[in-house]
Image (spheres, grey):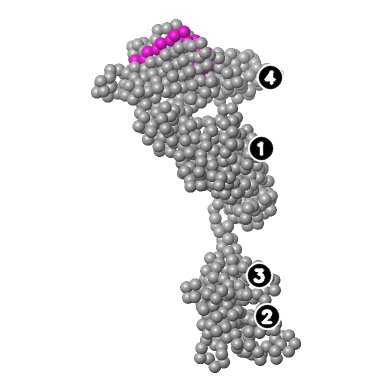
């Protein structure tokens, strides 16, 4: 499975990448803004996405909407500081299947990622091979 | 039936009549005492009555009439399993016309040939409810046929009766219900189950009656029960969240963070004895119950955490009071001592004057004039407090103004209205006394005026120099308190900072100065041993460029401790690849922790808050450091703040 990490902080992206080594994940892509995220998503069709909500250019909610509109279905986890109930509801309405709240610890991230991979498998999102 | 298992049956040998009744027990009913929801088929009685395939039908007849409970007989064909003839099937055969004549005189094989289905075989470790489901999902005409239980350890088969299985199952269900009832009556958490319409199921824990102060919860929608207790926003959010809970596409663990009632206050109407509205605090958590791909029910756990919360609130109040005192000390520190003296003196005088105005007897003065006089005094004092940045005083005076404002234009004024102002005046008085206390506390470590004069740059009073003076005083104070000799140099090159940036800049610089003084600059002894001048240097440089203002804050202390930062980053599990990223890490939320908190540093705003405040006005902060030599922060601010943010 492919994982797309979307976050404007390099530190957060790298932290996610290093901590989610999982036998199921064969390729990891990174995007530091919503527009690049969309390009990478449409090119590579990742089954798994972690999405920051506050980003330059195209924010997380708009990015989720575009992904839902065009791309193949994916298991998308929002990794962000959740500032408002409305934003969280918007994210769910646009296809996010859960939230990991920043700041998170590596064990929390690993547990969340295992759940996300399981979710992708159960829903039959497996586009490589 | 595969051949491999057939050899498990032994043909009874040496018997006269060709069969031997090997019945192990005479079951009437299943054991009642030991059954539990984890009971297996091994705990049910069974029969191992075996006959040869060629035995005559009349042997079967004799067997069934002698043992009316016998559910059936296992038939073997030369040591190999051939099948099972149940009692039901036997009587069905012989009750046909001439049945007795046909089947009694012929081998049992004939009756077996008329059995439609192979018997159901279940393992002895199969749970009783699972066995019930297996038996009841057989074709309808063979639902009540006996089934075989295979015990792998002893490699034996037994024949079990469905009726006994169902009896056992109902006993387990009854036991479970009793246990459930006991649990629901004794558990201290409020437990209930809601369905897709959010309606509360009939079984819920007894304590909920106490929590909600009502006992009619059955079938009511949970949001309806909570509606009068919650504020409308939370209630709306709860409704949204309940909808989300029943969405099977979402991941259980990953929707818990957005639970709006994880901790929630509930208002209860007043009781007869107590006229006040009561507030309880609940922690409400949800567990989704999945059946196949759907969420059919949600288990709701409601804890009454009022006591814990009240305790926490009380602690927070105490802490806030202590914090406010500290804040006042810090504010007082930043005010010119003579100006502060003048202000406190005036504050005391004016409060006394206001008190007198209020105390004047009826008729001796027009109430409206009194209000006007009070308002003028409060307003003037507020202006003075604001100039000195004594925000606590400014706030209190503002509150007093707010009370006076409507009275100024009120058509009629009574002396009672004036009496209502007394508490505000009292609060102001307390605050004035607190300044005195703070000043007393400060006397013990106040810098000598000599030192202060050295630290102050002698420039014209502008916004910039005001900022620098405050910073100089702050550093001078810390110099005394920490016994670290430091000189503060400032350089201003044509810098005219926008007023809008002053507060952010001031907060940032105070924070950086505090960090420098506590962590950066080494003690005089340590500096001497490192070959440094025992007196540390802190420099502030303001520079204007065509497109931005540049502020450089630098100390000649120990510099950033990369090892310590790296260790911290590792502990947080962050991934850092270069020194530049390491320097950036100190600005990430969550970097600074309690272990770096001392009385002076690490409190209040962190570097992350500074960076985001600067970013909000389009600014940047860039760290530079050489370990052992210096640490500098370069702040860049745009000339004109983006209108969006200001």
Question: Label 2, label 3: how many angstroms apart (C-alpha)?
Answer: 18 Å
Q: Secondary structure at mark 1?
A: helix
Q: Secondary structure at mark 2?
A: loop
Residue at point 65% right, 42% down?
Answer: B240
Q: Nearer the viewer, residue B530 or B490?
A: B530
Question: Residue tagged by mark 2?
Answer: B114
- Mark with earlier residue (2, 3): 2
Q: Secondary structure at mark 4?
A: loop
Question: Residue tagged by mark 4?
Answer: B410
Q: Is residue B589 visible?
A: no
Chain designation of label 1: A
Pinpoint residue B497: horizontal percent, then vertical percent. 50, 12
Please check whether the numbered discs 1 and 4 fall on a single chain. Answer: no
Comparing marks 2 and 3, which lies closer to the viewer? 2
Chain designation of label 2: B
Q: Nearer the viewer, residue B428 or A127?
A: A127
Question: Residue tagged by mark 1?
Answer: A69
Question: Residue tagged by mark 3?
Answer: B138
Is label 1 in contact with label 4 (beta carbons under 8 Å)? no
Pinpoint residue B627: horizontal percent, then vertical percent. 33, 25
Comparing marks 4 and 2, which lies closer to the viewer? 2
Give above or below for A120 relative to B457: below
- Mark with earlier residue (4, 2): 2
Is label 1 in contact with label 2 (beta carbons under 8 Å)? no
Question: Label 1, label 2: how many angstroms apart (C-alpha)?
Answer: 62 Å
Q: Which residues are magenta?
A: B487-503
Is label 3 in contact with label 1 (beta carbons under 8 Å)? no
Is label 2 in contact with label 3 (beta carbons under 8 Å)? no
From the viewer's perspective, is B551 left or right of B38?
Answer: left
Question: Label 4, label 2: how many angstroms apart (C-alpha)?
Answer: 105 Å
Please check whether the numbered discs 4 and 2 fall on a single chain. Answer: yes
Residue at point 62% right, 66% down?
Answer: B133
């Amino acid at each position: 499975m492919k994982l797309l990490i979307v976050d404007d902080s390099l530190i957060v992206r790298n932290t996610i990448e290093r901590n989610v080594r999982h036998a199921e994940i064969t390729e990891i892509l990174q995007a530091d803004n919503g527009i690049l995220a969309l390009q990478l998503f449409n090119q590579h069709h990742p089954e798994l996405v972690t999405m920051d909500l506050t980003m330059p250019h195209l924010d997380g909610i708009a990015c989720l909407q575009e992904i839902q509109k065009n791309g193949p279905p994916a298991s998308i986890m929002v990794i962000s500081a959740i500032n408002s109930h409305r934003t969280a509801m918007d994210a769910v309405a646009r296809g996010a299947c859960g939230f990991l709240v920043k700041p998170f610890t590596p064990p929390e991230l690993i547990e969340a990622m295992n759940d996300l991979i399981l979710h992708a498998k159960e829903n039959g999102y497996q586009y490589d091979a | 039936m595969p051949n491999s298992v057939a050899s498990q049956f032994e043909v009874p040998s040496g018997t006269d009549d060709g069969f031997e009744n090997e019945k192990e027990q005479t079951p009437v009913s299943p054991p009642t005492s030991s059954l539990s929801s984890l009971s297996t088929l091994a705990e049910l009685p069974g029969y191992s009555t075996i006959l040869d395939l060629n035995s005559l039908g009349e042997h079967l007849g004799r067997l069934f009439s002698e043992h009316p409970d016998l559910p059936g007989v296992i038939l073997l064909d030369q040591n190999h399993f051939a099948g099972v003839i149940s009692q039901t099937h036997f009587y069905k055969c012989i009750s046909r016309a001439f049945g007795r004549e046909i089947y009694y005189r012929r081998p049992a094989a004939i009756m077996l040939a008329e059995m439609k289905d192979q018997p159901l075989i279940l393992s002895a470790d199969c749970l009783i409810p699972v066995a019930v489901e297996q038996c009841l999902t057989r074709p309808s005409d063979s639902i009540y046929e006996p089934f075989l239980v295979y015990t792998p350890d002893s490699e034996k088969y037994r024949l079990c009766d469905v009726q006994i299985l169902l009896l056992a199952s109902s006993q387990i269900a009854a036991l479970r219900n009793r246990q459930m009832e006991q649990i629901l009556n004794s558990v201290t958490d409020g437990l209930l189950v809601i369905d897709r319409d959010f309606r509360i199921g009939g079984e819920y824990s007894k304590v909920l009656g106490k929590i909600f102060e009502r006992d009619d919860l059955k079938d009511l929608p949970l949001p309806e029960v909570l509606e009068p207790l919650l504020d409308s926003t939370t209630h709306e959010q709860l409704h949204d969240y309940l909808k989300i809970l029943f969405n099977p596409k979402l991941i259980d663990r990953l929707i818990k963070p957005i639970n709006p009632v994880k901790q929630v206050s509930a208002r209860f109407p007043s009781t007869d004895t107590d006229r006040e509205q009561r507030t309880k605090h609940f922690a409400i958590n949800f567990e989704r119950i999945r059946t196949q791909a759907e969420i059919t029910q949600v288990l709701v756990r409601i804890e009454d955490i009022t006591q814990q919360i009240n305790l926490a609130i009380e602690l927070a109040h105490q802490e806030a009071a202590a914090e406010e005192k500290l804040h006042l000390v810090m504010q007082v520190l930043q005010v010119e001592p003579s100006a502060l003296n003048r202000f406190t003196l005036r504050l005391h005088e004016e409060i006394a004057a206001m008190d007198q105005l209020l105390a004047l007897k009826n008729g001796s003065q027009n109430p409206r004039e009194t209000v006007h006089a009070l308002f003028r005094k409060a307003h003037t004092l507020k202006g003075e407090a604001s100039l000195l940045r004594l925000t606590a005083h400014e706030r209190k005076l503002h509150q007093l103004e707010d009370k006076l404002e409507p009275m100024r234009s009120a058509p009629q004024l009574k002396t009672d209205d004036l009496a209502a102002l007394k508490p505000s005046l009292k609060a102001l008085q307390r605050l004035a006394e607190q300044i005195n206390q703070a000043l007393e506390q400060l006397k013990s470590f106040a810098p000598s005026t000599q030192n202060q004069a050295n630290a102050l740059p002698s420039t014209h009073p502008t916004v910039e120099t005001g900022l620098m003076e405050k910073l100089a005083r702050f550093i001078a104070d810390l110099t005394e308190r920490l016994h670290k000799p430091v000189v503060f140099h400032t350089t201003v090159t044509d810098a005219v900072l926008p007023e809008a940036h002053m507060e952010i800049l001031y907060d940032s610089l105070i924070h950086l100065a505090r960090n420098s003084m506590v962590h950066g600059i080494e003690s005089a002894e340590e500096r001497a041993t490192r070959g440094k001048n025992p007196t540390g240097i802190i420099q502030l440089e303001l520079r204007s460029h065509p497109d931005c203002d540049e502020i450089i804050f630098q100390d000649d202390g120990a510099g950033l401790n990369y090892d310590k930062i790296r260790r911290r980053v590792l502990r947080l599990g962050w991934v850092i690849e270069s020194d530049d990223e390491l320097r950036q890490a100190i600005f990430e939320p969550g970097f600074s922790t309690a272990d770096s908190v001392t009385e002076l540093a690490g409190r209040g705003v962190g570097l992350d808050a500074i960076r985001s405040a600067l970013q909000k006005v389009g600014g940047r902060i860039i760290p530079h450091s050489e370990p052992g030599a210096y640490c500098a922060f370069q702040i860049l601010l745009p000339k004109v703040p983006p209108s969006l943010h200001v």
